[in-house]
Image: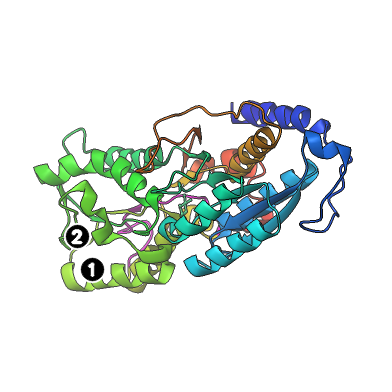
Amino acid sequence: MAKRKIIAALAAMAIGFTVLAGCSTERPVGTPTTDPTEAAGGGLIGITMPTKSLERWNNDGAELDRLLKEAGYQTQLDYADNKPEEQVKQLENQINSGAKVLVIASIESKALLPTLQKAADAGIKILAYDRLLMDTPNVDYYATFDNEKVGTLQGTFLEEQLGLKEGKGPFSLEPFAGSPDDNNASLFFKGAWDILNPYVESGKLVVKSGKAPKTLADWTSIGILAWKTETAQSEMENRLNSFYGDSKVDAVLSPNDSLALGIAQALESKGYKVGSDWPLLTGQDADVANVKNILAGKQSMTVWKDTRELAKQAAKMVDQIIKGQTVDTNNNTYKNNNKTVPTYLLDPQTVVQDQVQTVLVDSGFISADKLK
Ligand code: BGC
């Protein structure tokens, strides 16, 4: 199924991009052109990604850059080191260089508002990549994975593994959430908490640290700023030191792999052993270090989002925007507090230990030698 989807997407890209084959990608940024192929496409596309420190954004950026270049566009690919003010500078630079479309995976979308206005005033189209740009009319399209489903997959995994539906328990659970400035983090949490909270309320799941948000809106109280591994590690160590004594934690809800890495380190440092008392631990992204942890029994699952598919979809949407074609969307439920943003949603998927080879390696997402 996944293979068929990849082949279909590749074929679609090939058709879409053949007409652009042969366009120069060497023209200096911002230089006016009389290249007749420009009418069919071409021009500068700005790509801004949050940080190089997380594996997925490196993959996303490189793949999108490659696909757009292959399709005859010039690109400017920038990483902002998780600093909102740096991202503003990069976007201003892309606008001044004459970008026709900005593809933005934002850090803190609030910080971008005046810059987005400037881009819109200059007639530049804006595609929100993976993370929605909030509180602005100046976002034209959004390409992402079904973010709430990511959380649903994590919550359902814990529910099934613990046998909660069958009435088992009580078990101890420690929940974590992502960066408070990332809209995705609220959706991941909602998806998971809708499944888990009824068990917290019935006492089948016990959050010994007390760090169970009272309401969904309160999720930021357990958010880990900038999705930092070290912060998640120290938070988990504090919870284990302060609330567990001789008892053991049974399950940890981690919204993504960078947090899961820190949580696993904290468990290790507190003497937890794989196979005897290691708790269930969720994740997201299928980062290499985490897939290694899954193979070693230190992480129970990850939610895989094939970032190659997202890059393909985004490149296709950019191409359609430039050519004035109907832009491919499949969802109209994403609201950014200002408007409903036409969205293309891709499907995330749970991966557990015995699927690492068949799903992640066989699809070429991770090469086998990286897992050695
Ligand atoms: C992305 C996740 C990622 C997280 C940290 C989120 O917006 O959707 O895939 O793990 O940011 O970078």
Q: Is residue 152 above or below residue 86?
A: above
Q: Residue furthest front?
A: 121
Q: Position of residue 215 (x, y in %)?
A: 17, 48
| Mark 2 lies on residue | 211
The answer to the question of whether label 2 and label 1 lie on touching residues, with beta carbons closer than 8 A, is yes
Amino acid, disc 1: Arg
Q: Nearer the viewer, residue 274 or 170?
A: 170
Task: Report the side of 68 relative to 178 (left or right).
Answer: right
Task: Report the side of 13 relative to 217 (left or right).
Answer: right
Q: Secondary structure at mark 1?
A: helix
Q: Quadrant of the N terminus?
A: top right
Magenta stretch? 272-288
Question: Does residue 279 belong to the magenta stretch?
Answer: yes
Q: Residues within 10 Å of mark 1 (few under 14, many from 20)?
A: some
Q: Position of residue 252 (x, y in %)?
A: 30, 55
Residue 239, disc: 1
Q: Is residue 114 above or below residue 242?
A: above
Q: Residues within 10 Å of mark 2 (few under 14, many from 20)?
A: some
Q: Is residue 248 visible?
A: yes
Q: Position of residue 50 (x, y in %)?
A: 53, 60
Instruction: Tell me which residue sits at (80%, 35%) in the image.
Output: 39
Amino acid, disc 2: Lys
Q: Position of residue 126 (x, y in %)?
A: 56, 45
